[in-house]
Image (spheres, helix red, strand yellow):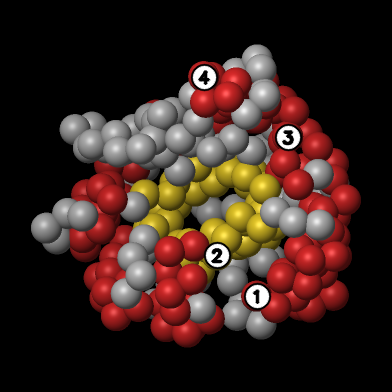
Amino acid sequence: MLGKPNRAGIIAALDTPEVARAEGWARTVAPHVGMVKVGLELFCAEGGNAVRRVAAHRPVFLDLKFHDIPNTVAGAVRSVCALRPAMLTLHGGGGSTMIAAARRAAEDALGEARPAILAVTVLTSFSTEGLAETGVNGGPAQQVLRLARLALDAGADGLVCSPHEVSRLRDAFGDGPLLVVPGVRPVGAERGDQARIATPEDTVAAGADWLVIGRPITAAPDPGAAAAAIAASLAGR
């Protein structure tokens, strides 16, 4: 299973349905990032082929956010373990039985070489008002802590959260859990559809292990240079 990086690492999000483009990005950014992310857009278009091709350049964070009955999620985890991802996501809202089933399935499939199981807490696109629409009151911070405790108690290795919750999670759970953080935007970058964001430097200072960065890298005229600039801004932190 993947451990913690020596210092905060960058995960380049390869959000495209075109595997050739994703592989080109992976090749270009590989010297400057620790992992690449394959999410729903690319996986639904190209499946395991996409994972295998980009994994030739960097380990893969497979961000499929499984959320179903425990037996179904366990079967899905066993299936994707054949692709040897470094990290794998599921929704913390799926509950403790589902998370425990996912962990057991990964262990059965790969033993100590299994992917790290990460529970997504509250998506970075959600605001307090958006959560309230779904019947969750109290705001993102309260819900993140609630789901984080549930997931870690059920065997998750880490959590996916916005930059706004990183320091709260470190205060609550210490240095043990992996904290993987999307919603990271360099100064001057467009917010896009993210509601809870912060700069790479502030996110690292709060205690993040991995920063998931997509459009600020892949939409840049030179993705490799963009990744290198972000990596340089974090050097020595």
Q: Secondary structure at mark 1?
A: helix
Whether the residues at callouts 1 and 4 have beta carbons within 8 Å, the answer is no
> Residue drawn at (72%, 41%), measured in percent from left and top?
93
The picture places residue 219, in percent across and down from the top left corner, at 21, 55
- Residue that badge 3 annotates: 147
Q: Is residue 166 left or right of residue 183?
A: right
Residue 85 vertical placement versus 134 (above, below): below
Q: Amino acid at mark 3?
A: Leu
Residue 181 vertical placement versus 205 (above, below): below
Q: Earlier in the sequence, mark 2 or mark 4?
A: 2
Give residue 129's mark: 4
Residue 78 vertical placement versus 224 (above, below): below
Q: Is residue 117 left or right of residue 26?
A: right
Q: Amino acid at mark 4?
A: Glu
Give the Cα separation between the discs numbered 1 and 3.
Answer: 24 Å
Give residue 204's mark: none
Q: Is residue 92 left or right of residue 61?
A: right
Q: Quadrant of residue 27?
A: bottom left
Q: Quadrant of residue 186?
A: top left
Q: Secondary structure at mark 2?
A: strand
Give the Cα separation between the discs numbered 1 and 4.
Answer: 35 Å
Give the Cα separation between the discs numbered 2 and 4.
Answer: 29 Å
- Count residues near mark 1 (Cα–Cα under 10 Å), then give few for <14, some for 14-19, many for 20+: some
Q: Nearer the viewer, mark 3 or mark 4?
A: 4
Give the Cα separation between the discs numbered 1 and 2.
Answer: 9 Å
Q: Amino acid at mark 2?
A: Leu
Q: Earlier in the sequence, mark 1 or mark 2?
A: 2
- Residue that badge 2 annotates: 62
